[in-house]
């Protein structure tokens, strides 16, 4: 029997890691330096993969900047989701409670994203010397942009709270994501130009920026001694249809010394030469899935998959199938067929998501998690 669910409920279920049941909750008092605010921690946790989240939701003051500062939607989504995975290494989901960043304001992040400036440049912009906090390289001549690209595109903060005495919660740790450019776009004499940044330079500059940033973070009230983890994210170019990935993270338990660790994650496009060369078995399974779709529904326009590999093992694959539909019953029949195919075509240990689209709209969502015997199917 196929299961159907409302998409909005699914999104809340997946992203917040909790059910909206007001009777199943713990009430706590969240203390800060000025006031005491009542907040709710849901008792229910659907899996170890998701953090519980304080309600009512308290957005970060820099909300929305990640979309405008990164090159594409795929990067902005993975920049946030990947930081959650990295955070679990130091802040387990059964102990820590997630909250959007509350300590770094928009003005500070905007300052960090700037270039270093000369005294003359500071005067031109009406800035003081103590506001020369840019983490990107100094640029004295516009013609030197290729030699001095902007490496840091965005900074993301996640806060992790722990319960303490007297039904209160306090800050237990912070994760910071640094989005780094693999391609730098700039204008010179009215023409757009770009420079590709080698991986070794991305890593060395990312670590340099992180080492400088940790010192700045320790100056912020409340962050003087809590554990801070900084993840380095390589974002793709503007035209990429697969997201970038985190490749390293460093943790400072209390001071400013970061202990670095490598992250073995990458996204691979299916079908592609890279997929065939690196993951031949998975590439063959994808081709079989694609051929089976084409055998029974010849009016499809395209099938593209984006697979996340962690430690060289398939973790999840998201597939977009675009069809030309002529009626709702055709959508239902096709979605049922796809649901049966993904059970047979992809490993049980990986998350499989299929988005069924027409030329103008999304028509269906099919999702199978590793612990599910049957996929969820939602027809829009």
Image (cartoon, rainbow, N blue to C red):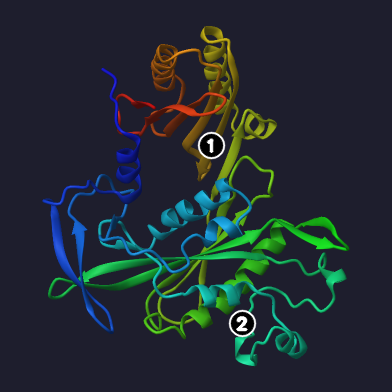
Residue sitting farthest toward the top:
296
**Residue 261 in sight in this render:** no
Q: Residue at x 58, y 64 (%)?
A: 154
Q: Residues within 10 Å of mark 1 (few under 14, many from 20)?
A: many
- x and y, in percent, of residue 123 in the image: 72, 89
Residue at disc 2, secondary structure: loop
Please state if 347 lies on the left or on the right of 51 as rendered.
right
Going from N to C along the chain, the mark reached first, 2 or 1, is 2
Q: Residues within 10 Å of mark 2 (few under 14, many from 20)?
A: many
Residue 174, how many percent across, how many down? Answer: 40, 69
Q: Is residue 177 above or below residue 338?
A: below
Task: State the separation of the CA atoms marked 2 and 1.
Answer: 38 Å
Residue 335 seen by the camera: yes
**Is 166 in front, or is 253?**
166
Work out whether residue 62 or residue 165 is closer to the camera in this orientation and state it.
62
Say whether residue 67 is left or right of residue 138: left
The quadrant of the image that shows the N terminus is top left
Q: Secondary structure at mark 1?
A: strand
- Nearer the camera: disc 2 or disc 1: 2
CB within 8 Å, label 2 to label 1: no
* Residue appearing at x 47%, y 75% in the figure: 105
Counting every numbered tag in the picture gives 2
In depth, the one of 253 and 74 nearer the eye is: 74
Q: Return the residue at label 1.
A: 307
State left or right for residue 272 relative to residue 164: right
Residue at image coords 75%, 78%: 138
Q: Is residue 220 above or below residue 334?
A: below
Pointer 2 residue? 133
């Amino acid at each position: 029997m196929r299961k159907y669910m409302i998409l909005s409920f699914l999104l809340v279920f997946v992203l917040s890691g909790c059910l909206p049941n007001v009777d199943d909750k713990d009430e706590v008092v969240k203390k800060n330096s000025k006031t005491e605010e009542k907040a709710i921690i849901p008792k229910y946790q659907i899996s170890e993969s998701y953090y519980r989240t304080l309600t009512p939701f308290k957005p970060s003051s820099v909300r929305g900047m990640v979309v405008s500062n990164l090159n594409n939607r795929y990067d902005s989504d993975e920049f946030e989701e990947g930081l959650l995975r990295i955070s679990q290494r130091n802040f387990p989901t059964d102990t820590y409670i997630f909250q959007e960043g509350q300590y770094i304001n928009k003005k500070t992040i905007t300052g960090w994203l700037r270039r270093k400036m000369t005294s003359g440049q500071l005067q031109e912009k009406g800035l003081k010397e103590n506001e020369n906090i840019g983490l990107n390289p100094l640029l004295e001549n516009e013609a030197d942009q290729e030699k001095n690209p902007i490496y840091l595109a965005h900074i993301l903060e996640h806060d992790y709270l722990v319960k303490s005495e007297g039904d209160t919660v306090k800050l237990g740790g912070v994760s910071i994501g640094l989005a780094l450019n693999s391609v730098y776009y700039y204008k010179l004499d009215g023409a757009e130009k770009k420079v590709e940044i080698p991986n070794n330079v991305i890593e060395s500059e990312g670590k340099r920026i992180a080492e400088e940033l940790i010192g700045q973070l320790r100056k912020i009230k409340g962050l003087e001694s809590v554990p801070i983890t900084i993840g380095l994210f390589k974002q793709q170019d503007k035209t990429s249809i697969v997201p970038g990935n985190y490749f390293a993270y460093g943790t400072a338990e209390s001071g400013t010394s970061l202990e670095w660790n490598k992250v073995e994650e990458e996204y691979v496009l299916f079908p592609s030469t890279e997929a065939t060369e690196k993951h031949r078995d998975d590439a063959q399974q994808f081709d079989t899935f694609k051929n089976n779709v084409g055998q029974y529904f010849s009016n499809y326009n395209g099938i593209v998959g984006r697979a996340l590999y962690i430690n060289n093992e398939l973790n999840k694959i998201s597939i977009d199938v675009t069809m030309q539909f002529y009626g709702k019953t055709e959508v239902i029949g096709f979605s049922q067929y796809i649901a049966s195919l993904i059970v047979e075509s992809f490993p049980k240990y990986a998350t499989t998501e299929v988005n069924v689209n027409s030329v103008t709209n999304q028509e269906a969502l099919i999702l199978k998690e590793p612990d599910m015997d049957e996929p969820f199917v939602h027809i829009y």
